[in-house]
Amino acid sequence: MTIPAQFDAKTSENKWYAYWMKNNYFHSKPDHRTPYTIVIPPPNVTGVLHMGHMLNNTLQDVLIRRARLKGFNACWVPGTDHASIATEAKVVAKLKSEGINKFDLTRDEFLKHAYDWTDKYGGTILEQLKQLGCSCDWERTKFTMDPDMSASVIKSFVDLYNKGMIYRGYRMVNWDPEAKTTLSDEEVIYEEQNGKLFFLKYKIEGSEDFLTIATTRPETIFGDTAICINPNDERFTHLRGKKAIVPICGRVIPIIEDEYVDVEFGTGCLKVTPAHDVNDKTLGDKHNLEIVDIFNEDATLNSFGLHYQGKDRFVVRKEIEKELEEIGALAKTEIHLNKVGTSERTKAVIEPRLSDQWFLKMEELVKPAIKSVLEDGDIKLHPKRFDNTYAHWLNNIRDWNISRQLWWGQQIPAYYYGDGKEDFVVAENVEDALKLAQEATNNKQLTTNDLKQDADALDTWFSSWLWPMSVFGGIMNPENEDFKYYYPTNDLVTGPDILFFWVARMIIAGYEYTDKKPFSNVYLTGLVRDKQRRKMSKSLGNSPEPLELIEKFGADGVRVGLLLSASAGNDIMFDEELCNQGKAFTNKIWNAFKLIKGWEVSDTIPQPESSKVAIEWYEAKFQQTLAEIEDGFEKYRISDALMAIYKLVWDDFCSWFLEMIKPAYQKPIDSVTFAKAIEMLENNLKLLHPFMPFLTEEIWQHIAERTPEEALIVSTWPEIKPFNAQLVSDFENTIEVISGIRTIRKDKNIPFKDGIELKAINNDKLSTYFDSIVTKLGNIISLEYVSDKVDGALSFRVKSNEYFIPISGNIDVEAEIAKLTEELNYIKGFLKSVQVKLSNEKFVANAKPEIIENERKKEADALSKIETIEQSLAGLQ
């Protein structure tokens, strides 16, 4: 088989992915093997690949490919999330561009448009993951709106309702006026924004007096139903029992007293707007205040806003400032830094709003999830520091608002049979609901036409919290073979930003429905940032297109570039140079393979001693590195594992091992050494395969003709064996000896073709096992151990050992003496400056221990160099 001069990434990627798919290597069925299971964090169905996806899914692919090589029945379940808010917004915008209003459609008509949209744009990201090399079990692909997945969600809702854990309540919720739906507390992002603090003047009824109140939201005065003062604030004792008049609208409201008021903030008075602030609502309930809701669902003002009716809240804020000033009701304004809640999905400013919603009680549900992670350690978060974040969220959890005012999603299975808020039943389908409604009303004449299903949909997270179970049918049929075999899953790879949204909730659901953990380990990746530490985003223009990176550097190069700096939980400062480094590594491995395959092989020549020694060393080094790699995987330090492989292949295999066994120019290599070189290469490919699947399969298939059963993807991960650690350690000394010889050759312009003598004083009793390597790589014609210094020779040291290279006739002795003398004087001057510093008692007393230690090391190094140079000078004179 002809080996191309260069590795063609594009051709290789297309060829081997098609080959893997054809041979069904990614598909898993329950069998006698131990399962290893990962479920993908389902990306939005209409999403496209971004750098975060690249990192997350590369890590998952590394884990699943390694598990496959280690003999596990590896199953990686892919899928997508219906993403209620984001997808519905896109569908509504599309309809609007076509002149269609969502509310002119029936729900079923709208859903048809939504499904058409997802059929057209959905799944793009899964196809893009294939280009990255992801080895998902595509036959198991799930979508959170698949019929069986939706049935699982509805069954879960009914079950929790029947257990008394789901209830309907009239509560203050987070309202997204752009998506026109409620959000859970966790979907609100608080951002610091500069705004204004408005000081408004409220007249006291029956007098010319007024009091001043500070607010950041003057447009909400139309919803004021009281003014509150602190009963301990002596400034306002004269206002007890009186009433005030709201500017513009003229509403007369009571002045109430409550210690909730912060006497230090603003003016010490608080306007109370129970319909538009959660704390005001608490005050309103306590003092039995009227509730006046002034906003429409799109955050425009309703009829309570008088002449501002129909205008957006922020437009009103600007206009009302002018009116308040004109009527003398605005005392002043100040710049004010305020934390503003924004929607995670639409970025709209959240409006607190009173609404009837469905809630899930969380207080009891979270207890097993707290115990499992924080007490028993059954589930481990990597890195462990996220335990604190997890604990904070779960220990301060509130009931979960699970209803959304959307149509795209699972419709809440509550059916109303009367006009009252409590006139409903909850059931998995309308037929069951009818039976319950007939029983509740004792009216057998009721029909399904008398029932009206709740229009709201369930929060998307209420669907995806079942993901590890529902993808295997574990909610609808918990006794099925797949669920019993693959669940609990093993590892979850995701971002820390959804530790609560998704990870914690999956743990909660897992214990609620199976009394088992859903997974054992959670690997939390960092964010991919640019070189300036900015989060990557299309709006900033700092996020490269992943598919363009793959086109430019190859999928393997991009995977390596990302993972080399992707330690768990730490952000990545992404630079394209990382991918270039990955591509360079790809080329290095390809060239090493070409070098080996380019050698002529002989069955008749004996194996050189240097090759025998090289093989023994590399086998030991390989085993030492394999132990490091396994330790990295065990601790979920995947980048450390990759770096260990990188150094092994680049430095130890390519730079040393191949150099040690390489035959002389135009000479053959012995067959024993060649066979071992191929074996070493194949073992390297096995370690590299999870990280660089395309390159490794390409080389593997070039090495020999392979049957589908012999493909690299289904080969066997190397086995850890005992190794000679002393051999590895001794070779480090050998490297220094070879480097010393090469330095002298370079400095003295001694061509490598010229053989030189080497004499050594073995003061440290260093191993002579690698002498054949020193002889070969230094082109030493004779190596002799002596007891005395050698006159007329250049020298260098390794530890306490001294090495001498007798001078050849082509060295200018006078020039060499002058050069060494100059270097000696420089180092003596440097040594003096260091010793002056170390003799300074004040410096030694105040400097950090590590600084002093560094200075002492400088002193020791300088003394050693001086001794070596003086010996070289003595040999020359």
Image (cartoon, grey):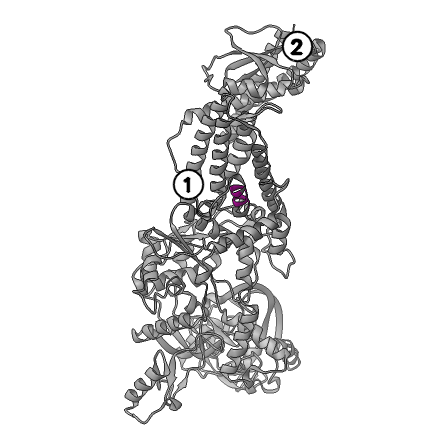
Which image quarter: residue 729? top left
- Secondary structure of the residue carrying tag 1 is helix
Q: CA distance from mark 1 to mark 2?
A: 50 Å
Q: Quadrant of the N terminus?
A: top right
Residue at far front of view: 604
| Visible residue check, residue 843 | no
Residue displayed at 50% across by 54% down: 134
Counting from the top left corner in percent of width and height, residue 847 is at 52, 30
Q: Amino acid at mark 1?
A: Glu
Q: Which mark, by number, is residue 630?
A: 1
- Secondary structure of the residue carrying tag 2 is loop
Residue at far bottom of view: 445
Q: Is 700 covered by the magenta stretch?
A: yes
Q: Earlier in the sequence, mark 1 or mark 2?
A: 1
| Visible residue check, residue 622 | yes
Main SS, magenta residues? helix
Specify whether 729 is left or right of 95. Answer: left
Q: Where are the magenta residues, as a range? A: 695-701
Of residues 643 and 307, the one nearer the viewer is 643
Q: How many marks?
A: 2
Counting from the top left corner in percent of width and height, residue 758 is at 57, 12
| Residue where numbered disc 2 is placed | 808
Density class for disc 1 (Cα within 10 Å; few <14, some 14-19, many ≥20) is some
Residue displayed at 61% across by 55% down: 547
Density class for disc 2 (Cα within 10 Å; few <14, some 14-19, many ≥20) is some
Q: Quadrant of the C terminus?
A: top right
Q: Which mark, by number, is residue 487?
A: none
Residue displayed at 56% across by 51% down: 15
